[in-house]
Image: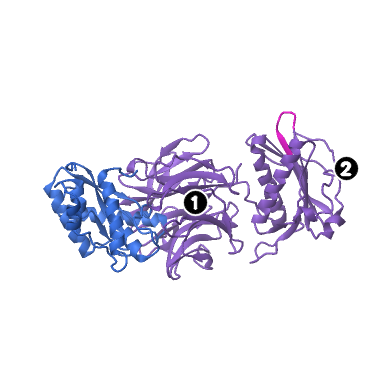
Chain colours: A blue, B purple
Amino acid sequence: MFRKTAGHKVGLALVGLLVLAGCSKSEKPDLLSQSTVNNATRVEPGSERDFIVNVGDRIYFLVDQTTLTPEGMETLSRQAQWLNQYPNVTIQVEGHADERGTREYNIALSARRSTATREFLISQGVSAQRIATLAYGKERPVALCDAESCWAQNRRAVTAITGGASPG
Amino acid sequence: MRLTQTGAAGLSLAVLQRLCAGLLVCIGLSLPAHAVLEVDINRGQVDPIPIALPNFSGADTQSQQYGVDITTIIGNNLERSGLFRPLPQNSYLQQLPDFNAQPQFVDWQTIQARALVTGQAVLLGDGRLRADFRLWDVYGQSQILGLQFVTTQKNWRRIGHLIADAIYKAMTGEEGYFDSRIVYVAESGPKNQRKKVLTIMDQDGFNVRALTSGNDLVLTPRFSPTSQEITYMSFAGGRPRVYLYNIDTRQREVVGEFPNMSFSPRFSPDGQRVIMSLQEGSNSNIYEMDLRTRRLRQLTNTAAIDTAPSYSQDGRRIVFESDRDGGQQIYVMNSDGSGQQRISFGRGRYSTPVWSPRGDNIAFTRFGGGRFSIGVMRPDGSGERILTEGFHNEGPTWSPNGRVIMFFRDSGGENGGAKMYSVDLTGYNERPVPTPTFASDPAWSPLLR
């Protein structure tokens, strides 16, 4: 069910850092600073890793909300720009809900989030054919504590690359 | 099939009941009299009725062991219902009353048993197992019920459940629920990559059996009211869709091909239709699929999330949740989609409504003040009662007699997970439901046939 790609592992590692960095104060964890990562390893432009590290593969939502936040729109604009630069890349937008909701509703809610994300990318010129969606409901949290700081990270839409990216 | 009189107690034998799918034969050892010792189960907290259950006797070691094991199942079922208090066997003044003789009632009155069950297990020449039992009114000094069950040895646990159901019915006036099963989602592995396996077990937690491999995420299984079929949602192939699964044949099929995700399925009372949500962009609406013709009918059409539909027991109405007025609330409609009307107006959000098999109540999950509760209300929204409240309770399902509600409770925390519980309709007698792993999304089967 879960894609077992290098990029996915990188994504999880980043989330781990984000939890440490952003948990205490801000509702929306900040993106890891680019320099930290760039210093660690070189990132191949047009690669999945490039997308995750330099563009940002996920956006966050407020409690029970499916409207995009200003920060979310900024990230999605960067995503659209990158996707327009690499037109062979195809993506799947995965919607998620936090665990403070019932199962069926959260599935539908996360579908709304992935749909809102997809529509925004389309509005920024990304072809609809390149964007699949998947709604996970509350089934795949990334942050596991029983606090708003964690739930905030779980209310997300993650843009996963499904094909066409450069290796590396 | 007719048996000859063997008892000395002047009990007439009459063929009474059903042939249970060729496996279980049930024969009356007397016509059931009225429930002399009625337990008033409509009161809030009941005083459980003291009942004596000496081990069923057996002519040889093997049948004696069956006798002990069957007696244990009966006792556990009755005790877990909260309506009976099986008396400890070491208090009995008679250990093995002769099955065919009148008990010495005074010995059972002395230990304050109000009812007594006597029985025997018999291995038949063809290898099948027979269990005979009699239920006695200790103070009225008369037999309330006498029945005989025959089955293959493999099915021996069901004899215990069927006898417990017969005792429950004779003493409460309502159908029992012990000869039934639970389908649920067994959970294992780390919380951020939880493995979920569709699993079935007897209602008392025995005979646990996995139905899926765990490779695909599976959610919200629901029993057919009329057959050994379940409907559920699976993420197989990365396409979340509603499936049907036949427990006996292990055949699996997709309910239908739709442009987007299908989810939150449930059978109609006749088992011929499935209602579910279909996602359409940002919205989800409720549709009904006729399983014979595969014809699809749209029942709701709003710019909202309409989901978790559940039929009334007569199939004429449907209860569901919707966020059309803002947060999640409960609505009812006619089964053709007409007459949609909100029924929940309390504080908080109301979701996962399930119509009772008796028709008189709707169970739901409520979220408010950071806490998740399980409650019931009448179909017109009146008489709301919360049965349990805490960090996270979700997903009620009804016992086949509409008396007991099972749900899951998530403890939260990084290493926490969901476990299942049952609670009486009155809110009393909350019990954990034993499962080998974390467990969620319980669905109670109808009585087995």
Q: Nearer the viewer, residue B129 or B215?
A: B215
Q: Nearer the viewer, mark 1 or mark 2?
A: 1
Seen in the image, is B401 located left or right of residue A161? Answer: right
Residue B2 seen by the camera: yes
Q: Residues within 10 Å of mark 1 (few under 14, many from 20)?
A: many
Where residue B20 sits: x, y (%)? 65, 38
Q: Which callout, 1 or 2, points at the residue further toward the start of the chain?
A: 2
Where residue B281 sits: x, y (%)? 28, 53
In the orientation shown, which residue stands out farthest toward the left? A85
Residue B15 seen by the camera: no
Question: For residue B326, which quarter of the picture?
Answer: bottom left
Quarter of the image with the C terminus of chain B in it: top right
Where residue B414 sits: x, y (%)? 41, 57
Q: Give the range drawn in magenta.
A: B124-130
Quarter of the image with the N terminus of chain B in it: top right
Q: Mark 2 falls on what kind of element?
A: loop
Q: Mark 1 points at which residue?
A: B439
Q: Mark 1 lies on which chain?
A: B
The disc placed on residue B8 is 2
Q: Mark 2 lies on which chain?
A: B
Q: Distance between the residues labelled 1 and 2?
A: 50 Å
Seen in the image, is B148 located left or right of residue B268? Answer: right
Question: For residue B241, which quarter of the picture?
Answer: top left
Seen in the image, is A48 located left or right of residue B391? Answer: left
The residue that appears at 48% across and 55% down in the rendered structure is: B418
* Residue B369, placed above or below residue B288: below
**Amino acid at the residue labelled 1:** Ala
**Amino acid at the residue labelled 2:** Ala
In the orientation shown, which residue stands out farthest toward the top? B126
> In the rendered structure, does residue B128 fall within the stretch colored magenta?
yes
